[in-house]
Amino acid sequence: MEVKIYRELENEALILDEVQLAEYNDLTAELGLQTIEQSEEQKVPNVYAFLNSAMTKQLHAICPRHTDVKDYKKSTIPVEVLKVLKFAKENKMYEGYEIWYNDVEPDPLLIGWNYSSDTAREKKYSWQKDRFLMARWGDCAMDLPKLMDLGFNKLKQELIDKAKTAISTCKSVIEEPEIYVRKILSEQSVNIDLKTISDSTIY
């Protein structure tokens, strides 16, 4: 079992070293800075990898199933990851925590999230969240660039497969159109689909 924690190396000491954390808090207060990473309730700054839209889509391709961390039952969460989760919760680092996973392949992800705005929080808009990659565990815990490459390649293969299926369907329609006309007339669906978005996905 491998575990990978995705802290930003340049800021990691802020949650591991009380002296550096105190200096950070003093300086931000003195300069009147409202940091993006830290809300008023947060006791420590956020030091985990922020996921932009493209990164979120790539990770979703790897782990398409999402559940609240308290409802996750597919595998045992390692102690090291539980310690990360406990620290983040105690210090109110995020508003919520999810496990992203894949039923076919192992290596789940621990994701922390905050609402993107006060309006999103008030309305509970699930699509307006800032997400942060905290940890990954399983047979292969990769560095972030390699993890993104894995997601990119999975998306690419999915698109290729859909294109090949569409081409096959189109050839069949051209070669035997009568069959498809009869299907349409008998109210059967004839679908040639290249969409890469649906109600059940984020890409």
Image (cartoon, rainbow, N blue to C red):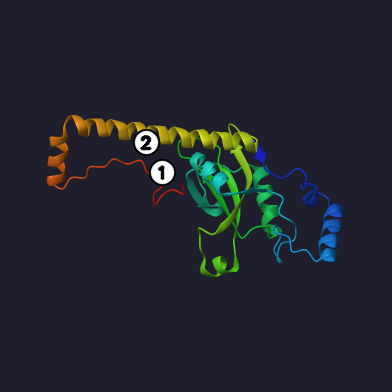
> Of 52 and 170, which appears nearest the observer?
170
Q: Residue at x 51, y 33 (%)?
A: 153
The disc label shown at residue 162, or none:
2
Question: On the image, numbered disc 1 is attached to which residue?
Answer: 196
Q: At which x and y percent is residue 49? A: 66, 47
Q: Residue at x 36, y 34 (%)?
A: 163
The quarter of the image holding the N terminus is top right
Q: Are marks 1 and 2 in contact (CB under 8 Å)?
A: yes
State the image quarter where residue 140 is shown: top right
Q: Is residue 128 left or right of residue 170?
A: right
Q: Is residue 4 left or right of residue 178?
A: right
Q: Earlier in the sequence, mark 1 or mark 2?
A: 2
Residue 31 visible here: yes
Up/down of 196 relative to 44, above or below: above
> Of 92 and 60, which appears nearest the observer?
60
Up/down of 122 relative to 138, above or below: below
Q: Residue at x 54, y 59 (%)?
A: 128
Amino acid carrying mark 2 in the image: Lys
